Image: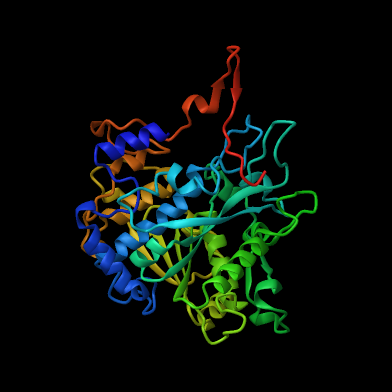
Amino acid sequence: MGNVISYLKKKGRQICGGRNTHDTTKTTTGVAERWQLLSGTTNWKDLLDPLDLNLRQYILHYGSMAQATYDTFISEKASRYAGASRYSKKDLLSKVGIEYKANPYKYRVTKYFYATSSSLVLDSLLVVSLSREAWSKESNWMGFVAVATDEGKLALGRRDILISWRGTIQNLEWVNDLQFELVSAPEIFGERNTEGDEPKVHLGWRSIYTSDDPKSPFNKTSGRHQVLDEVRRLVEEYKNEETSITITGHSMGAAVSTLNAVDIVAQGYNKPKDMPNKACPVTAFVFASPRVGNGSFQKFFSSLQNLRILRVRNARDVVPLYPLIGYSEVGEELVINTEESSYLKKPGNLSSWHTLEGYLHGVAGTQGSKGGFKLEVDRDIALVNKHMNLLKDEHCVPESWWCEKNKGMVQKEDGSWLLMDHEHDDF
């Protein structure tokens, strides 16, 4: 994949972030000066329709961080590392094409986190290796925590702590496999005596977020605790600076991101321990998110200070409509419609309307309520075909071009071949 990235860079194509490289200084300055507005201090009032240029770039930046979790994930069940990250923490952002010279938003990945599930959603949402020497039979790599470098801080206007949750890589049949049961989550909301006004959330999302497994070396503590501990550490490390916490995810990752954002604010993880009055803002940019909780969850969300969520929804995507009954949406919504893009094949389908790269293409070109489609930022259309076949043939971009050379098979000196598809990091 490195050769493909190098080629596109030489041809002047933009891999990530959606900025016009000729205007880098101008757009970076805009983001640095306006970051609080872009992170939702006014709930994005007057910024969504028409979509503000800086906000468009901002959403693409965080969406690309969510896409990174797909691009590094090993889904090949023949690999002993199925369900793990292909790339190590130090190489992740460069290997997935996010860290390059023209991108001023620099981050350092500080933590990988893992999740398991105690419910029946395991087979639907997690990938398990077929190998008897599998790295784990109980856990999956679920994302990363990163922090803006000194250079990134200048471009972003503050020290940003980023959490990116991976979504499911299974086809959309997982939606039908899930039971939409609402359950209590006392670890997030505290113990409550009023049954009729109790915040409840989707069983599957809570299970992925809060489950641990003593048999797994990667989930002796839950994904929740792994993330919260790292957020606490970083908030303390940078407590004398201006900071923010930004969470992103797609599909299942969007739902878990919503829980994570609420949890961080409700439990005070956005405040240094000895500076309780210095709460930093927490913002989630989520894409194609299923609904997360009931009306009382929505009420609880609305009662929290310093918390904002922007949901990006493709008009034809069915996933954000699930579950159909008993659930309420939280935050603000940006609606896009990829069917209006002249670059994409017609008609689309359930998968094309849901894929994250399709969403990011839609963000790059949406014209809001006036309709139509025009790319307002220089985001390479080749990215749309990274994992699917969405672009019209006239653009001459191969379908599903994001793939490891020979699927990770490497020839040894004796002529035999061995699957070597994982950079050693945590194990």
Q: How many marks?
A: 0
The residue at the point 80 percent across, 53 percent down is 214
The N terminus: image quadrant: top left
Front residue of this view, candidates 103 and 190: 103
Q: How are the residues colored?
A: rainbow
Which residue is the extreme one toward the bottom?
Answer: 277
Which residue shows up at 39% across the image and 67% down it?
333
Camera sees residue 281 = yes
Image quadrant in which the C terminus is located: top right
Q: Position of residue 97 (x, y in %)?
A: 40, 44
Examine the image and state in which quarter residue 287 appears.
bottom left
In the image, residue 358 sits, relative to residue 239, either above or below, namely above
Is 315 placed left or right of 307 in the picture? Answer: left
In front of the other: 173 or 425: 425
Question: Please, is residue 229 above or below residue 18 in the view?
Answer: below
Q: Residue at x 30, y 53 (%)?
A: 18
Which residue ends up furthest to the right in the rendered image? 214
Judge left or right: residue 171 versus residue 334.
right
Q: Position of residue 73 (x, y in %)?
A: 54, 42
Looking at the image, residue 33 lies above or below residue 427: below
Q: Quadrant of residue 225?
A: bottom right
Residue 177 in picture, x, y percent from top left: 62, 48
Left or right placement of residue 173 versus residue 159 in this view: right
Q: What residue appears at the point 70 percent right and 53 percent down from the top-left corner?
A: 117
Quick check: can you spot residue 353? no
